[in-house]
Image (cartoon, rainbow, N blue to C red):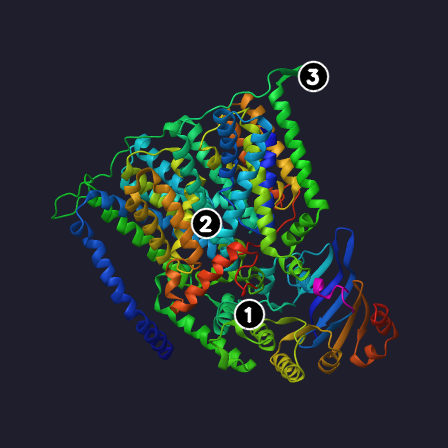
């Protein structure tokens, strides 16, 4: 589960760092991906990998459309930061409720795709989770690759540091934001699709996880991919193990308290750069 | 010295007479509302609008200084739980618990504010978020707060006994409504006083340019902490009211989501308007879902849609309209056209800087 | 002649880089001291340390007889050091008058509850400060623009507004960071004249500037920094002929 956090944090990080929109509806794309996978596999008996691809692509496209439709306009008018938040919240409501209507309120499972267990160093993990981990790692590496090596990725990084300078170099900021949104939502969809066979899914999983991911992103430092990875892992592992030993509620409290302290001492997050005031 | 005073007063009187008349009419309507609209459900809505307005006002005050909180609802919850515990466990009268929980919330804000406020900017947001999570979890985890099921059967306020009149019992919604009016007005007046006074000027300075404000002798920390405590106390006040009005409280109500909604109320109303904006914003966000109830399960979909549309077309919020001059239809059409064009191509409006 | 500001062995490091080191400087009461040096010599860092925005890594700062090393910016402002910033740092979204009025922050003495209750004495004080703000605006020649938004002012006027706000704090020492940069010839003349008048009112001035003519014209004494160290100090004529100074400027590129 920690890796799911990592994936989501990376995607969210991407969107926030590059386009500056605090995209609170992000979790819904995650949920969407999960349900697409479920729908395809359970209802239509589509093979796993194809379903996974669809689960990645559909949210990506949806994200792109939504960006064009909504956020592009907001970016060009005053008070982008605040209005973006409100739009994202509205979107979150919208998508969340739509999902609720479409899928009903109960949670579902998809059922294991791969049967069998693996024994690693005395700990038994289902094959499922191994696949999940592998896929997640692939995606993360892929993201890293895109950002570091490709033209598009370079453009994204340029824009996240300084949109004006980037514009001088011929980077179209709108297209870049669009790209960030598409990729980010795609990652979310992928994460949802990948985890669906392993964990239960429900329409409300989008909302609850979004704020958590936001915290992770901020912990790792906005704009820092390694930071997001680290923070996601830390969070995931602590939650899982902590739950085992201390009990759900308390561990969460402690965790957040610790996060608060960490942020206090390192305002930029674990690995990010300290930022000044917010663009209000 | 007399001249100075006359000068200043005459300026203020002129500006105020228009406002006073407007406010007077509004006040009259508000006071007569239960008579005009005897439907208790609407009264309930108005009460919620009142509560939400205060939360939104809180957000705007801190926003003006360059601080974004997600902890609004957390302090609201602290006020609610404190008041409940005071009345239920310690048998305090509501009328004592109300100010007491406000003060206690303020104290808690003072203590937590110390580390939080030191650094502004992004870390503040994160920390308030963490704080919001923690508080909600604390309420849910420890049994003294009733756990996840919360506390119910919270006693209603004791009747007010005024001389010569029958005691005012808090049975129907109406007395609550008037109490809410009183509390909201109180908060509005206090906040306005702060804004109009030098404190407000200092806050604005901090919001516009903290560096410059510092070089002019403004103690950033002190003013930020002050704002933090004041807003927390206001939220706590409404929390106490809410607990005894609603009769039951659950931890879920006081989480970060509610704080986000408070932000929405404030932003929709218009962040340029510290008092009126939140009121309008929460009015819309409370009334609209009700109106849309005919769509039954689709209601949040439409509400979300409306929110998105509002924010897309009204960047300064609803009240921002009063600041813009009405545009000739041709220009509005041009804007719509450029929006559609923007959907299909890469470029949005040409005057994007 | 008394020393109003004394800096002893001041040092400021950022990580491994020393922006200032071993700096000894004295500023005499009511003088205009110029601080020059190639870009990156540490002049603005020096200002930041003196005015409390950065704590020094070593050394002491003594202002008006008091050791103020490490004090925070707002405390330093309260003690009587005012400054303007290199970039036009103003309250852009409010009017010129409001800007200067805000500058009077420290003069506002009425207790907070009286302010909140809007007592007559609060009114009076506000009116008094308003008049003082107008006086400053008139002195600096911006009175006619008092209701204009700060953001709408031309660059030259914005710099002057910055000085107005610093004056509003009733400083004993004024730190001017590149006051005439970006101005045309007539604006520079105006500013020079204004600076002289400010000094005549008893304010000591330390000036960082790249415009050599202005510096030579205006300053009683000049100190030269290079790579964070003081390499020369003295009267303008002495500095003009100082070989080391010339080399420092030439050596840094064209």
Q: Numbered disc 2: what chain?
A: A
Residue shown at 63% from the left, 49% from the top? A274
| Picture coordinates of residue B324, whole percent (x, y) | 40, 67
Describe the element under mark 3 as helix, strand or loop.
loop
How far is mark 3 from mark 1, CA to CA?
A: 70 Å
Expressed as whole percent of the image width and height from the top left, the position of residue A132 reads 62, 27
Instruction: Classify mark 1: residues with Cα within 10 Å, few (<14), some (14-19) or many (20+).
Output: many
Mark 1 vs mark 2: in front: 2
Q: Which residue is mark 2?
A: A87
Q: Chain of mark 1?
A: C
Across and down, in percent, residue C200 comes to 63, 82
- Looking at the rendered image, the disc whose residue lies closer to the viewer, 2 or 3, is 2
Q: Which element is circle 2 on?
A: helix
Judging by the rendered image, the residue that carries numbered circle 3 is A121
Q: Are marks 2 and 3 on the same chain?
A: yes
First along the sequence among labels 2 and 3:
2
Which of the numbered marks, if any, corresponds to residue C56?
none
The answer for how far apart the CA atoms under marks 2 and 3 are is 48 Å
User: In the image, which residues are magenta?
Assistant: C38-46
Is residue C110 in view? no
Q: Is residue B142 left or right of residue A191?
A: left
Which residue in the structure is indicated by mark 1?
C169
Q: Nearer the viewer, residue A248 or C24?
A: A248
Closest to the observer, A64 or C50: A64
Up/down of B237 relative to C45, above or below: above
Q: Quadrant of the N terminus of chain C?
A: bottom right
Q: Is residue B1 magenta?
A: no
């Amino acid at each position: 589960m920690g890796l799911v956090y990592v994936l989501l944090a990376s995607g969210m990080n991407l969107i926030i760092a590059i386009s500056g929109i605090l995209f609170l509806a992000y979790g819904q794309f995650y949920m969407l991906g999960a349900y697409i996978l479920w729908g395809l596999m359970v209802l239509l008996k589509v093979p796993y990998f194809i379903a996974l691809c669809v689960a990645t692509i559909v949210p990506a496209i949806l994200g792109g459309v939504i960006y064009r439709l909504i956020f592009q306009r907001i970016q060009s008018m005053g008070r982008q930061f605040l209005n973006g938040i409100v739009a994202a919240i509205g979107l979150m409501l919208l998508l969340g409720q739509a999902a609720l209507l479409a899928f009903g309120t109960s949670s579902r499972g998809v059922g294991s795709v791969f049967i069998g267990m693996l024994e690693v160093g005395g700990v038994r993990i289902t094959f499922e989770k191994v696949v999940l981990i592998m896929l997640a790692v692939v995606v993360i590496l892929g993201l890293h690759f895109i950002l570091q090596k490709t033209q598009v990725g370079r453009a994204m990084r340029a824009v996240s540091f300084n949109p004006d300078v980037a514009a001088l170099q011929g980077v179209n900021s709108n297209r870049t934001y669009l790209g960030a949104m598409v990729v980010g939502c795609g990652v979310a969809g992928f994460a949802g699709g990948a985890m669906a066979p392993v964990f239960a899914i429900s329409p409300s999983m989008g909302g609850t996880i979004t704020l958590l991911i936001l915290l992770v992103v901020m912990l790792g430092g906005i704009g820092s991919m390694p930071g997001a990875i680290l923070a996601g892992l830390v969070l995931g592992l602590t939650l899982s193990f902590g739950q085992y030993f201390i009990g759900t509620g308390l561990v969460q409290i402690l965790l957040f308290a610790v996060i608060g302290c960490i942020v206090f001492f390192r305002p930029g997050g674990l690995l990010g750069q300290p930022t000044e005031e917010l663009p209000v | 010295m007399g001249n100075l005073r006359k000068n200043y007063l005459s300026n203020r009187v002129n500006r105020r007479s228009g406002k006073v008349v407007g406010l007077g009419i509004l006040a009259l309507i508000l006071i007569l509302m239960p008579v005009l609209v005897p439907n208790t459900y609407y009264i309930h809505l108005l009460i919620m609008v009142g509560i939400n307005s205060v939360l939104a006002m809180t957000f705007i005050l801190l926003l003006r200084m360059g601080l974004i909180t997600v902890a609004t609802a957390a302090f609201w919850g602290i006020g609610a739980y404190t008041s409940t515990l005071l009345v239920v466990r310690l048998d305090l009268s509501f009328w004592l618990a109300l100010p007491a929980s406000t003060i206690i919330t303020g104290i808690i804000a003072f203590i937590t504010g110390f580390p939080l406020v030191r650094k502004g900017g992004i870390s503040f947001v994160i920390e308030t978020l963490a704080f919001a999570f923690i508080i909600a979890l604390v309420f849910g985890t420890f049994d003294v707060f009733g756990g996840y099921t919360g506390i119910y059967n919270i006693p209603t306020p004791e009747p007010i006994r005024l001389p010569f009149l029958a005691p005012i019992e808090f049975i129907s919604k109406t007395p609550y409504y008037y109490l809410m009016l009183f509390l909201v007005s109180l908060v509005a007046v206090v906040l306005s006083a702060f804004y109009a006074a030098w404190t407000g000027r200092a806050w604005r300075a901090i919001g516009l340019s903290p560096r410059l404000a510092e070089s002019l002798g403004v103690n950033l920390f002190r003013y930020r902490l002050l704002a933090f405590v004041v807003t927390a106390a206001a939220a706590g006040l409404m929390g106490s009211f809410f607990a005894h009005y609603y009769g039951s409280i659950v931890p879920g109500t006081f989480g970060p989501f509610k704080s986000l909604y408070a932000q929405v109320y404030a932003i929709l109303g218009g962040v340029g308007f510290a008092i009126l904006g939140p009121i309008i914003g929460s009015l819309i966000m409370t009334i609209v879902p009700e109106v849309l109830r005919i769509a039954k399960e689709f209601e949040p979909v439409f509400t979300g849609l409306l929110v998105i549309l509002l924010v897309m077309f009204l960047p300064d919020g609803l009240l921002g309209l009063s600041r813009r001059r009405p545009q000739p239809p041709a220009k509005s059409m041009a804007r719509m056209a450029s929006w559609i064009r923007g959907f299909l191509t890469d470029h949005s409006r040409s005057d994007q800087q | 002649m008394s020393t109003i500001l004394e800096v002893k062995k001041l040092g400021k490091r950022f990580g491994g880089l020393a922006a200032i080191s071993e700096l000894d400087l004295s500023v005499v009461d009511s003088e205009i001291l110029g601080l020059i040096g190639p870009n990156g010599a540490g002049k603005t860092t020096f200002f930041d340390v003196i005015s409390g925005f950065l704590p020094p890594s070593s050394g002491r700062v003594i202002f008006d007889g008091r050791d103020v090393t490490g004090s925070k910016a707002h405390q330093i402002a309260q003690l009587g050091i005012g400054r303007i910033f290199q970039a036009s740092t103003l309250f852009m979204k409010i009017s010129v008058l409001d800007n200067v009025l805000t500058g009077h922050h420290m003069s506002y003495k009425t207790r907070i509850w009286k302010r909140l209750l809007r007592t007559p004495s609060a009114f009076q004080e506000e009116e008094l400060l308003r008049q003082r703000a107008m006086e400053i605006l008139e002195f600096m020649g911006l009175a006619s623009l008092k209701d204009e938004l700060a953001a709408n002012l031309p660059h030259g006027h914005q710099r002057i507004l910055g000085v107005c706000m610093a004056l509003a704090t009733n400083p004993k020492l004024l730190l001017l960071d590149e006051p005439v940069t970006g101005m045309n010839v007539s604006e520079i003349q105006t500013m020079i004249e204004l600076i002289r008048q400010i000094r005549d009112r008893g304010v000591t001035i330390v000036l960082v500037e790249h415009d050599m003519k202005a510096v030579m014209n205006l300053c009683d004494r000049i100190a030269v920094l290079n790579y964070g160290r003081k390499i020369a100090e003295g009267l303008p004529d002495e500095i003009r002929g100082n070989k080391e100074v010339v080399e420092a400027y030439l050596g840094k590129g064209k």
